[in-house]
Amino acid sequence: MKKILSSPESPIFLKGRGMEEDKAANALIGLHRQIVKYFYSGKSRDFKAYSDDSDGTIVKPVLIVAEQGGSNAALTFLDDGMGVEIGYPLLTREEASDMHVKFAMAHELGHAFSLRLANLINMPGLSGPRMEVIADLGAVFALIKSGEQWGDIMSAVRSGERIIFDSRWNGDHPPAADRVEYIKGLESKSLSNVESFTEQVQRIIRKVPINPF
């Protein structure tokens, strides 16, 4: 079973068991807002996934909760665009903190604007592991601009193995230890603005293997 949980047009606030869902939905709206503000000049409420032009699919700050889903998150298609789907097990997993959930959602939004970010660092055509890492880095920037603290983000990242990260290579996803090191490569001062952030992203992405196999 899946349910559309929240959007700016029709927020749904659940009680009891759904309190975790409320926080996740509100966090997603805040992350989406910061991406639009810093990477799309704040000119529109939504942005296009995987595209810098009018051909992309609109990404909306809509959270889909899959009650029978896994302990993860993913971009998912809506009738009029894309939103983020998250498995209910991740929302209620005892060892998963709020920041683990926020990072998982931010990472998926990071995928959605990854092409935009790749173009900003003059590395169009990124693929494979580099796309996973650039989504992680974009997630960190969006979280910081949403008011989260660097220390809290890094605490979740370091403890993310088997919660939001895999311990070994999984497809294009680097092992947890590698992802932590790439994220640590961001200097906190580089998160103050897009220009300094993209300089650090370019430096980090060059260290990521194009193909791990």
Image (tube, grey):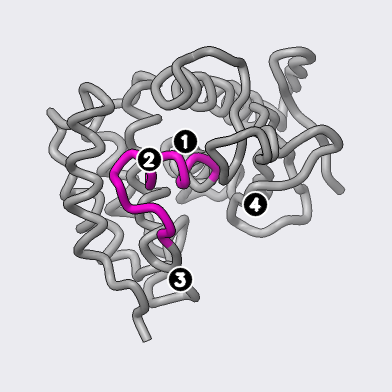
User: Is 116 within the magenta?
Assistant: yes
Between the residue at mark 4 and the residue at mark 1, the CA separation in whole angstroms equals 13 Å
Q: What residue is at 49 percent from the left and 14 percent from the top?
A: 42
- Secondary-structure class at tag 1: helix
Q: Amino acid at mark 2?
A: Gly
- Secondary-structure class at tag 2: helix
Q: What residue is at 63 percent from the left and 27 percent from the top?
A: 25
Label 2 neighbour load within 10 Å: few <14, some 14-19, many 20+: many
Q: What residue is at 65 percent from the left and 46 percent from the top?
A: 86
Between the residue at mark 3 and the residue at mark 4, the CA separation in whole angstroms equals 23 Å
Q: Amino acid at mark 3?
A: Asp
Q: Which residue is mark 2?
A: 138
Q: Which residue is mark 4?
A: 89
Q: Are marks 3 and 2 in contact (CB under 8 Å)?
A: no
Of pointers 3 and 2, the one earlier in the residue sequence: 2
Horizontally, is 53 left or right of 123 in the view?
right
Of pointers 2 and 1, the one earlier in the residue sequence: 1
**Which numbered dot is residue 172?**
3
Q: At which x and y percent is residue 126?
A: 41, 59
Q: Is residue 132 above or below residue 10?
A: below
Of pointers 1 and 3, the one earlier in the residue sequence: 1
Horizontally, is 66 left or right of 143 in the view?
right
Q: At which x and y percent is residue 79?
A: 86, 37
Q: Amino acid at mark 1?
A: Asp
Tell me where the magenta segment starts and ends, as one range: 112-126
Of pointers 3 and 4, the one earlier in the residue sequence: 4
